[in-house]
Amino acid sequence: MKRSLSLSLVTLFAASGALLGGCAEGDSSSSVSTVPSASTPALAVPEATQDGATNEAPRPAAPRPQLAKTATMRLAVNDIREAVQAAEAIVRRENGDVLQQNETTGEAPSATLQARIPADRLDAAITAFRALGRVDNVNVQAEDVARQLTDLQARLSNLERTERALQSILDRATKVEDVLKITERLSSTREQIEQLKAEQLNLRTRVAYSTITLQFQPQILGETALPAFAPELETAWRQSSQSVLLLVRGLLVVGVWVLAYSPLFLILIGGGYGLLRYQNRSTQRRDRQPPQQPQP
């Protein structure tokens, strides 16, 4: 009796121990599965903001436009020499440089001045040039060279990596033939790098400095500005002149066609004239014949 009771107690303790161990394993396994270990990389989950949107990585900003500006102005002035000197003073005042200057004398004197001015001072310089005389024409053009600069930088980076790789190979080369080939390739790569750097510098200079060309011509004494309706008259004159030219051209085309068919017209006219004369002669002969007497 006591032995069976002790066996029952041992069996009960063993079953309860197994049950408690299973629960402990379940808890430990669930806790392990929910907490990532140090060796297992955790997945990056975007954090939610207050309004429910996720924080994404900021997109790279678009490159700013790199504008290379060129301008031309045509001015009518009283004294060309004084106007050129005043324009040179304006260029120096705006921290620019005179690139080219040409003057012609005679019955129709004129002058041309080409200058390079910092891009941020171009508008101020144009305003100052307007005060030199009557402005007949102003033209400002801008070219965005940002894509060209980006392309040049990418090509330059690739060539520089190629140069470093060739230099590394050259340092380890032992054969004379290999050294000569690598040296030739290295020299060609270096030449391409220098060319790309020169192009890059030229584009950056065009962006930093704008080029303006001034054309000076004498202003006729007593010359006044055209009235407001002058553009309408100019348009009417141009349209009427074009209409007259079209009419003259049409008449010339018709004349060419008539000249080409003139032999056929002459034949038809000659044939008609001959037939008409033949009919007239026949009529005259019938009129000259005496009337026949009726037979008894």
Image (cartoon, rainbow, N blue to C red):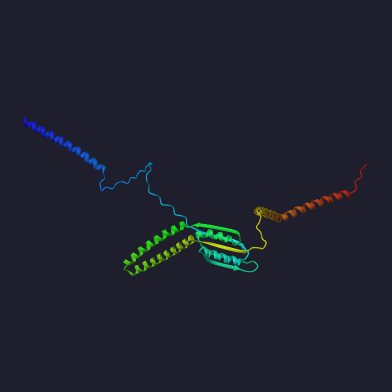
Asked if residue 65 lies left or right of residue 251, the reply is left
Q: Is residue 51 above or below residue 152?
A: above
Q: Quadrant of residue 49?
A: top left
Q: How many marks?
A: 0
Q: Is residue 206 above or below residue 229?
A: below
Where does residue 92 sit, x and y in percent of width and height?
A: 52, 65
Check the image and name the residue furthest to the left.
2
Where does residue 87 sit, x and y in percent of width and height?
A: 56, 64
Q: Quadrant of residue 186?
A: bottom left
Check the image and name the residue furthest to the right.
296
Check the image and name the residue furthest to the top.
1
Where does residue 136 sit, x and y in percent of width and height?
A: 61, 59
For the point 37% across and 68% down, the residue is: 183
Which quadrant, please, contains the C terminus? Answer: top right
Is residue 58 or residue 266 the one in the foreground?
58
Is residue 57 or residue 236 the one in the foreground?
57
Which quadrant, please, contains the N terminus? Answer: top left
Q: Is residue 110 above or below residue 230?
A: below
Where does residue 7 sit, x and y in percent of width and height?
A: 9, 33
For the point 35% across and 68% down, the residue is: 179
Asked if residue 151 lies left or right of residue 11, the reply is right
Q: Is residue 63 above or below residue 294?
A: below
Is residue 191 or residue 218 the one in the foreground?
218
Asked if residue 189 lies left or right of residue 243, the reply is left
Asked if residue 224 lies left or right of residue 284, the reply is left
For the point 58% across and 58% down, the residue is: 138
Q: Quadrant of residue 36?
A: top left
